[in-house]
Image (tube, rainbow, N blue to C red):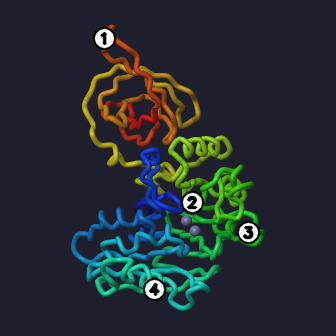
Amino acid sequence: MTVPIAKLSFWGVRGSTPTVDPATWRYGGNTPCLELIAPDGTQFILDCGTGLRMLGSRWAAPKGGKNPETHIFVTHYHWDHIQGIPFFSPLYVENNEFQFYSFRSKFLGRDSLKQVFEAQMALPYFPVDMSAMNAKRKFKEVDGGDSFTIRENKITARWLNHPQGCLGFRIETPAGTIAYATDNEPGDAKLDESLRELAAGADILINDAQFTPEQLATTRKGWGHSSWLEGVRVAREAGAKTLVLFHHDPDSTDRMVDSLLKRAREEFDSVFAASEGMVITLGAPGEGVQAHMPGTRTALRREAQFRAKVCGMTEGGKAFEEETMVRDLSLQGALISLKHLPQLQSELQVTMEAPGENGVQAMKLRGYVVRIDEGAEKGHVAVGVVFTD
Ligand SMILES: [Zn+2]
Ligand SMILES: [Zn+2]
C-alpha cells in the first residue's frame, strides 16, 4: 500500500500589496497564493494574489492529456487576493477547466466572483476583455458553515473577522488537514470560535501574522489582521500541530519576519514563516510534516574551497559548532556540508577563512538556513544558506 502524500506550495505570502524591496526578497513579495495537491491528484489553489502568475507560468499538463481538476478558493475580494487572476495564463487556454469558489458579497450580490473577474478586465483597466479567456470557468457560491467533499477531500468554510468579510477554508485530505486562515483579526467572540473550529487538530494552520502583538493592540487595531502570538494561541487551543505565519506586512523586512518567527518558536514547537517557494509535504513516511525550500532563486553559484567554522542550532534545539569546507558559494549564499542537522529557517554563524593581503583572514557571515538536502558524503547533509549580513 502506498502512503497518501499531499503537497502544499507557497506561491505568494505577502499581505496587502506586492513588494520588490530587496530587503523583502528572502520571504518574497508576491501576494497570497497557495497550491495544494491532494493524494488523489486533486489540485486546490487558495487565493489569487500575484503569486498566481508564477504558478501559471510553471503550469504543466500531465503526460497523456487532460489537466486534472483544479478547484480555486478565493477567501475575499481585497486586491491582494484577486490581483493575479488576469495574469494567470492557464485561464486563456481552451482546454483548461476551473471551478471557482467564493462568497456572495453584499456589495456585489449574485455571482460576486464572476463580477470581480469582469470588473478587473473591463476596459481601460486591462488590455483585453473577458472574451480572451478561453478556459472553462464555473463559479460556486459558498457560505460560512458550508461543508462539502471534492473526491476524497472534505472542505469546510468558516467566516473570519475582516472588513467586508473573509472566509477561512479547512481541507481534510487522507494525508492530513490544512486550515487556511488568512486575513483575520482576533476580538470577536463568535468568529474567534469559528477560527478555532477551522483549526481543530489541523496538521497545518496557516494564520495571518501581519502585525506584531504590540501593533495589534494599538495602532493597527481594527485593521483586520492578526499576529504571531495570536496564531500561537489558536494553534495551542485548537490543537493544531504546525503553525505557518502568513500574510507578512509589506513594511516587514526579512530581518523583521526572522524576529517574529524567532519569538513564535520560543512559544510553540513547530512554526514556520511562510516563504515564497516553500513546499510542505504532509503524510511522508517517518514524519508528519516536512518543509523544503527549493533553491531556484539562489543562482550565480560558483564552486569554491573555503575552510569554515559553523555555529548554529540543531533540529533538537542543541547548539553545535563544526569545522567544514564551503564548496559552493554565490553572492547570496552558500551550500555547506554538515554532520549536524540545523533547523530550517534558523540562523548559522559561518566563519570562512579566505586568503587576504596579510595571509589568511577570517570572514564572518550570518547565514539563514533555506534548504536541507541529503549530502553527497555519507553522514552529512547539504545545507543551503543565504547570507543576511
Ligand atoms: Zn490580504
Ligand atoms: Zn483583506
Q: Which residue bears the numbered disc 4?
A: 114
Q: Secondary structure at mark 3?
A: helix
Identify the image quadrant of residue 207. bottom right
Question: For the residues carrying marks 1 and 4, which lies nearer the camera in this image?
Answer: 1
Count of labels in the image: 4
Are the residues flagged by discs 3 and 2 in contact, CB closer than 8 Å? no
Who comes first in sequence, dot 4 or dot 2? 4
Q: Is mark 1 within 8 Å of ligand 1?
A: no
Q: Which residue bears the numbered disc 1?
A: 357
User: Which residue is at a point 66% across and 64% down the rendered structure image?
Assistant: 223
- Marking on residue 193: 3
319 is higher (above) or lower (below) than 354:
below
Give me the C-alpha separation between circle 3 and circle 2. Answer: 16 Å
Are the residues flagged by discs 2 and 1 in contact, CB closer than 8 Å? no
Question: For the residues carrying marks 2 and 1, which lies nearer the camera in this image?
Answer: 1
Give me the C-alpha separation between circle 3 and circle 1. Answer: 64 Å
Question: For the residues carrying marks 3 and 1, which lies nearer the camera in this image?
Answer: 1
What crowding class fits label 3: few (fewer than 14 Cα within 10 Å), some (14-19), or many (20 or more)? some
Who comes first in sequence, dot 4 or dot 3? 4
Q: Is mark 4 within 8 Å of ligand 2?
A: no
Q: Residue furthest bottom?
A: 110
Who comes first in sequence, dot 3 or dot 1? 3
358 is higher (above) or lower (below) than 109:
above
Q: Secondary structure at mark 2?
A: strand
Q: 237 or 19, which lies in front?
A: 19
Q: Secondary structure at mark 4?
A: helix
197 is higher (above) or lower (below) than 323:
below
Give me the C-alpha separation between circle 1 and circle 4. Answer: 66 Å
User: Which residue is at a point 41% across and 42% down the rendered structure image?
Assistant: 371
